[in-house]
Each structure stands twice: as structure tokens, then as C-alpha cells.
Image: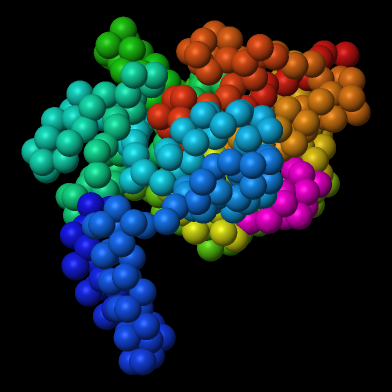
Amino acid sequence: MGTPPHAAVNETVKLAKVALRQGAGALVNGVLRTISRDQARGELLEPKVEGDSRSQARALADLYSHPVWMVRRWLCRFGRSETIALMDWNNKPPTYSLRANSARRVSRKSLLETLNELNVISEPSSVLEDFVRVSGGLQAVIRGGLMQRGLCSVQDESGGLVVKVIDPQPGDIIIDCCAAPGGKALNMAACLQKEGKDLFYHCRHKFPMVDILKMKLAVFNLGAGKVFAVDINKGKLSLLQNAAIHLGVDDVVITECSDLCSYADRHDLLADKVLVDAPCSGLGVLSKRADLRWRKTSTELEDMVNLQSILLRSAARLVKPGGVLVYSTCSIEPEENHGQVYNFLGCHREFKLESVEGYVPKTFVTREGYFASLPHLHNMDGAFAARFVRMRV
């Protein structure tokens, strides 16, 4: 972290006394001062990456602070140099991005100007027209009230690219099946709301004598579309509702607390587009959630795969003929991504895979036609999305 050794030792000793007990401070002090002294002399022992694959994985796991099972998986798939690059990315301070709220007609340019006034270092995203990259933490943004005023929301560019794969269009009925905490649902709603407002301003200019209130009601009732946000977590869904109010899209977003299987059983609604942003291992977002690497196990990964399969099958029932189903995760693991697509298509002949080319930049399009971002290659969270189309009878 760049902290001087003496300061790091002193602060850690204080923490040990508070978090554990007074006597722990002496042990922590002795261990850390020994490490600091050996490091200064160039005598600090480090694991050597040598021997068989297991030994190398253990050494890399120690050097880069990742679980051994995770390192072994990545070594098999990516090779040594790319695995090191991925772990190095996960250990760096995370990067954040903000989405300018088009629903309130906030442009990226105006957002950048506001951030500059707050002395927040930022730059335009190179892949998304409404996104801004922010250097450092988000405290200045929060203190400045930008999100409270509905000027922007926090969303990683990978999530914005998934919304591009969905491609919300005027009048679309969209179901977000695992919506909370709501980044993608609110983004889709903003796209629909913006289209409705653009249509309203166009009509007002072309037909100035028409009653403005009647025109507004007609445009928004017929043109904006709706996002049905479904999630089993009531608390997180409440946060989504509050965020929708701040961002000015609460008239487009309709929330329902339910598990997806029950929702599909109860509703006859067939949507134009359905998103399954499935619960996953989260191994694509380890830079933002450093604790996650130590809480996940390979067994949990298998459980996630089973749940994802159930959710995807349930979501398929909600797509109208000719409609679109998008499956996405914030994982970089093949079982949760490519494997789910393969299994789904094998059981659902009424769906066909459609390439995401044309929806996202080519650098994110895989050979099979999926969207995929890798943290160490694209400098954003790792994510995946596949786009299916339900064939007409």
C-alpha cells in the first residue's frame, strides 16, 4: 500500500490490541518488525515458483494472495504469465466508473465538468458513450451528492456492455429476473426513458399547438416501455426502488419481490427481452471484493452452476416468440458461462444463439459470439453475456 514500514507496524499493533486483546500487540509487533528488518536487508524469504504444477500453484498463491484452488484453475486455462497478470489486477486498488443519467438528460460532458469542480480525477470511457472512469475512491462523489441528485450512478463498464447486449428499444417490455441491487435494471430504464423523452421533445417541436400534458401522457404510456425488476431479496429491491426515484425512472421500473420460478408460474406476461444476470461465483470482480476470494470454494462453484441452470430455464418461459433472452454473470469461469449456454441450447431447441457482434466493440466478442471481458485485458470487471433469440412458431 506504500505505507512506511514503521507506520504500518504501529497501526497494525494498535488494531491487534483492539480486535484481539492487549497481549496480541506484543506478538504482532515482534513478527512484523522481524519481517520489516529482513526486508530492509534483502533477506526476506519468498516462495520460489518451481517444481511440479502443484508446487508452482502453491508458491504463486502465497506470492499473490489467492487460494490455491483458484490459482490452479487459472494456470490450466490461462497459463502462468496471464494468471499472474490477473492476480496482479485483483490486488491493485479497484477502478470505478459512473454512468451519466440520460433519463435526466445529463450528458457525459456535464458530468465530467461536475467531477472536475469536485477535484475528482476522471476521464471518458473508451467503450461507452455515457460512462466516465474515476480515479481513486468515490467519497468525493458521494459527498458531492451527485447520486442523490440523480446525476449519475455507479456502474462498472462491464455491466454497461451487458445492457448493450440487451439493446433496450422504445416500447420494449423487459424483465430483469435477478435485478437487485439494480445497476442493469436502472440502466435499461434510463435507455427507455431517454427514448420517450426524445420522442416527446421531437413531437413538441413538430406539433407546438398540441396540449403538452396530453402529448406527454401519450408518449410515455406508449413509447417508453417498462422494466419489470424481479428479485428474491426484499431489502435490496427496496434500494433499487429508491434509486429509481433519484434517477427519475420510477415510472418505468416496476418491482416485485419473488423467486424467479414462482414468478414464471404466476405470470402470463411474455416479454420482448428478458435478462438473467445470474448469481455467480463473482470471480470477475475480485479487485472490488478482496474478501470474496477467501470465502469461495470449488464446491460452492458447483452449487452456483446448478442454481444458474434452474434460473435460466425459468426465465426462458417469459420470452415471447421473436423475443430476446440474455444470460450474464460477473464470473470468468467456463462452467458458469460457456457451459451454461451449451446445456441450455441442448434442452431448448426453440432458442438460437445470436452473436453479440454489432452490440459491443469487437474486442469483447468471443469466437463463439459471446460477450466476455477479462479484468487484466480490458481494465474492467470480468463479465460474460450470451444473447439468445426465441424462434417464432
Front position in the image: 78 or 278? 78
Q: Which residues are magenta?
A: 296-308
**Where is residue 27 drawn, in percent x and y?**
37, 83
**Where is residue 318 drawn, in percent x and y?**
76, 34
Front position in the image: 175 or 108? 108
Q: Can you tell which quarter of the image residue 12 is in?
A: bottom left
Query: Residue at point 29% right, 32% down?
Result: 133
Query: Residue at point 75% right, 36% down?
Result: 335
Q: Is residue 268 left or right of residue 157?
A: right
Above or below 332: residue 26: below
**Where is residue 287 drawn, in percent x and y?**
44, 45
Quadrant holding the C terminus:
top right
Q: Can you tell which quarter of the image residue 267 is in?
A: top right
- Please identify the dominant SS of the magenta region: helix
Front position in the image: 264 or 139? 139
Above or below 46: residue 87: above
Image mark count:
0
Q: Would residue 237 be counted in the magenta stretch?
A: no
